Image (spheres, rainbow, N blue to C red):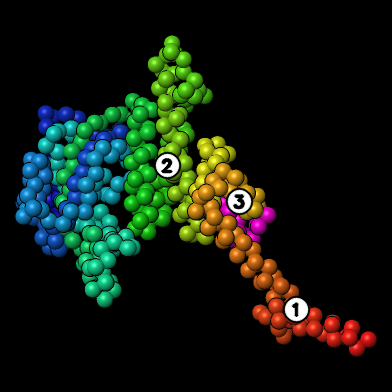
């Protein structure tokens, strides 16, 4: 298919049905950067051909930007970039897989995909911070990319199992983490929330994994295992949500996300406790911060992070008191605003001096 914009090469194998919107798809994916936008042709790159035959060579392989296995997504949820979403719609299960060739804007928009801060430091230090330097990009703007995709399973949404829900949620979290690293906060929040909703929305009985007796039914065991397996994913997604909201200075939302963790999933979670303290301090709720900090110290007495948060709490509280004192003195017209300690010392000497004169 060649329309001058996006090209896909598909193998339909034995003529199996193509996936439909709403289907649950598990797949492997490899992505390569070929070069500038003008290099799109109908000929597959040697790297893609070799990757499909499982024998890539160093000489044939262009820049490699993506290599994932066992991603599971619900087609139509828009978890993936448009180029990959469209590719999955036109592929059936086949061990040879298929290929999508696309302009990079259909993967990562017109700005491309930059390297996360702190990576590839040697290249970036010699680039003089040139915004157009391709060494600072994983996928440069206006480039051509190819992705080889192998679909492993296709299931209708009605057949979604508890195991499928776990796999989908894990993939959403991974894609959300990648979006966070590259500054797409809106997308990562949507993915984290979607993962939590997916796992919490599964209707399973209230039964614990270790409560299943030897003779319990297989359904009960699966339900119990699901409830146990989803906890770390939900906790991670809520903690990551709180981290994004903290960066956006949405401190009330930070407390809400962390409170969900402590109230329902893990009442001793260190990250949630610390982030509530941080958010409460930013909101000048020092009483609330002190209450949660005491729990963090009780549950994690040797944690360096908890000790750091305790020091932050003390310093922020001192700074806040100083600001309030300066504001009060300013309201009274005191010329020593910002230097209240000297004002206090001065008043003490005046008091002593007056007593001496008496």
111, 33: nearer the viewer: 33
64, 86: nearer the viewer: 64
Q: Relative to residue 238, is residue 15 drawn left or right?
A: left
Residue tagged by mark 1?
344
Numbered circle sitting on residue 293: 3
Numbered circle sitting on residue 194: 2
Q: Relative to residue 33, is residue 21 drawn left or right?
A: right
- Note whether 284 is above or below 129 in the view shown: above
Q: CA distance from mark 1 to mark 2?
A: 56 Å
Horizontal and vertical percent for residue 6?
18, 52
Q: CA distance from mark 2 to mark 3?
A: 30 Å
Residue 18 in view (yes/no): no
Label 2: which secondary element: helix
Horizontal and vertical percent for residue 180?
38, 54
Q: Relative to residue 308, is residue 152 drawn left or right?
A: left
Secondary structure predominantly adopted by residues drawn in magenta: helix
Q: What residue span does the magenta drawing correspond to?
A: 275-287
Q: Relative to residue 155, is residue 193 drawn left or right?
A: right
Hey, which quadrant is residue 128 in on the image? Answer: bottom left
- Note whether 311 is above or below 273 in the view shown: below
Q: Confirm whether the magenta stretch covers residue 276.
A: yes
């Amino acid at each position: 298919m060649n329309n001058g914009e996006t090209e896909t090469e598909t193998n339909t194998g034995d003529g199996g049905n193509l996936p439909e919107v709403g289907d649950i798809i598990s797949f492997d994916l490899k992505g390569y950067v070929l070069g500038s936008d003008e290099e799109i042709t109908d000929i597959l790159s040697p790297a893609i051909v070799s990757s499909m035959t499982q024998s890539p060579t160093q000489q044939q392989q262009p820049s490699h930007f993506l290599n994932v296995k066992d991603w599971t997504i619900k087609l139509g949820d828009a978890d993936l970039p448009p180029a990959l979403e469209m590719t999955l719609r036109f592929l059936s299960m086949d061990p040879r897989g298929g290929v999508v060739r696309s302009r990079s804007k259909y993967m990562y928009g017109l700005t491309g995909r930059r390297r996360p801060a702190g990576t590839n430091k040697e290249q970036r230090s010699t680039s003089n911070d040139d915004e157009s330097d391709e060494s600072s990009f994983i996928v440069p703007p206006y480039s051509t990319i190819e992705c080889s995709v192998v679909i492993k399973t296709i299931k209708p949404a009605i057949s979604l199992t508890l195991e499928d829900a776990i796999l989908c949620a894990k993939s959403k979290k991974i894609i959300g983490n990648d979006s966070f690293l590259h500054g797409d906060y809106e997308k990562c929040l949507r993915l984290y929330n979607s993962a939590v909703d997916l796992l919490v929305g599964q209707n399973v009985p209230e039964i614990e994994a270790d409560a299943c007796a030897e003779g319990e039914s297989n359904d009960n065991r699966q339900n119990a295992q699901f409830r146990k397996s989803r906890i770390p994913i939900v906790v991670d997604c809520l903690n990551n949500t709180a981290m994004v909201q903290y960066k956006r200075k949405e401190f009330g939302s930070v407390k809400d996300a962390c409170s969900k963790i402590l109230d329902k999933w893990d009442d001793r979670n260190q990250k949630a406790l610390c982030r509530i303290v941080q958010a409460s301090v930013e909101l000048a709720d020092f009483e609330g911060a002190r209450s949660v900090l005491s729990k963090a110290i009780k549950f994690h007495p040797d944690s360096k992070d908890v000790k750091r948060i305790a020091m932050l709490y003390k310093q922020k509280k001192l700074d806040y008191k100083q600001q309030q004192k300066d504001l009060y003195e300013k309201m009274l017209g005191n010329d020593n605003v910002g230097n209240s300690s000297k004002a206090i010392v001065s008043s003490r000497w005046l008091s002593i001096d007056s007593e001496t004169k008496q």
